[in-house]
Image (cartoon, rainbow, N blue to C red):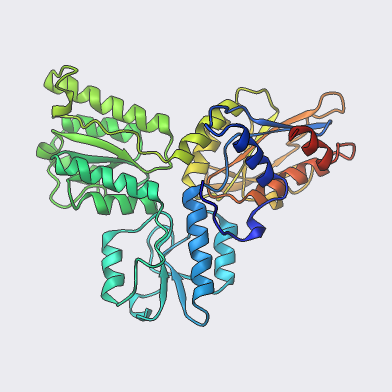
Amino acid sequence: MKSFDIPDYYRSSIITPLKEFRRKKDKLKRDFTPTLLDFGPIRVLIARHFGFCYGVENAVEIAYKAISDNPGKRIFLLSEMIHNPDVNADLQDRGIRFIMDTKGKQLVSWSDLKPEDVVIIPAFGTTLETQNQLSSLGLDVAKYDTTCPFVEKVWNKAGQIGQKNYTVVVHGKPSHEETRATFSHSKESAPTVVVKDMAQTQRLAKYMLGELPPDAFYAEFVNQYSVGFDPGRDLERIGVVNQTTMLASDTQSIADYLKQVMIQKYNLTADSVDTHFANTRDTLCYATNDNQDATYALLDYPADFAIVAGGYNSSNTSHIVELCEEKLPTYFIESEQKILSDKLIRHFDGHTKQEVVTENFISHYNGQEPATVLLTCGASCPDAVVEGILLKLVSFFPDAHSINEVMENVMK
């Protein structure tokens, strides 16, 4: 496994060695059981897989290399490097400026950029239109391109099925940077439409089956289809790809549903399905799959509540939160600073899209039974953040075993 050169302050003297210990014991990644850190009055179950993935570490390494390679030069990021506030804030503190926000709104005019400036492409990738814009200004778009290889894998898959005359259906959040980039690349080789969820997929099926008039499609899917898209023509042969950070189960359900629609419409057999539905393999990245599988395994253990760490605009993290919320009280926080005391926690409500404060989040503890917490985070969250949360929770229990004692017991 490649080792990346990232700043030490993103790593943890507790979490990083723990992850490496588990990795060495389970090189084939077949054991998804969580790690139990038993402090006595508080027990913390940590997911088997979480935190910086290959694509994120690669992006962080390249971004900091760009800073060290170019003293005195202006350095720009197209938008957030990754969806983590600590990483983005640190890059901005070092002088990096964002050209756009996460929704694509321009923050720095193209006319302000000069050929000698340095531009970093974030891990989500970018659109062909933006690449062309940068190139036309004389900027090098390849030198510091941190696009995740698993995102590029989706682009390649879309291109492959497009060359076979399939329309590409992208399961993703239409406004997300990655989905916008995938849409841009896909539409170069195939008619493309984006669906955000199963409800919208079911609406798309009605156009496929002729149950809704084609003209209504354009209003319902505004900004989600490629130029010249004809629902009467372009929904006869399709293939499904996705934003790499979506829930695997959701993407699979959407693909299975659309496959059944095609079987129903064209009376297809197992041998003839591919005449109307492309056999696309799952295009989620390995880290998203591992983190989601580890979360399912984590949730098999009884606990009082869960804490999920990460940026509030992180798609992969929000899906982990959704899984946890189905089972027990879950608090989505950016860092240990959101744990205000042993009584109060400030956390993000994904339904209202606002932070809220919950009282007595450890109120069940009576000194008799230990408090049990599930702890995990998204793929763009540094180990140091997870360590901070762990130590903050343990600090509320004066009689807790020392971290050295607990780690020694775990890593025997």
Answer left or right for 336 relative to 190. Answer: right
Residue at position x 30%, y 25% in the image: 256
Residue at position x 17%, y 27% in the image: 274
Confirm whether residue 291 shows in the render: yes
Confirm whether residue 175 shows in the render: no
Residue 89 in picture, x, y percent from top left: 58, 64
Answer left or right for 219 relative to 91. Answer: left
Q: Quadrant of residue 49?
A: top right
How many numbered dots are placed on residues in this image? 0
Q: From the viewer's perspective, is residue 248 above or below residue 112? A: above
Residue 360 in picture, x, y percent from top left: 76, 37
Which residue in the rendered view is the most extreme toward the left?
Answer: 233
Residue at position x 61%, y 27% in the image: 33
Residue at position x 41%, y 33% in the image: 248
Residue 184 in picture, x, y percent from top left: 26, 54
Q: Quadrant of the C terminus?
A: top right
Q: Quadrant of residue 84?
A: bottom right
Residue 95 in picture, x, y percent from top left: 54, 74
Closer to us: 246 or 278? 278
Answer left or right for 287 relative to 265. Answer: right
Q: Quadrant of residue 266?
A: top left
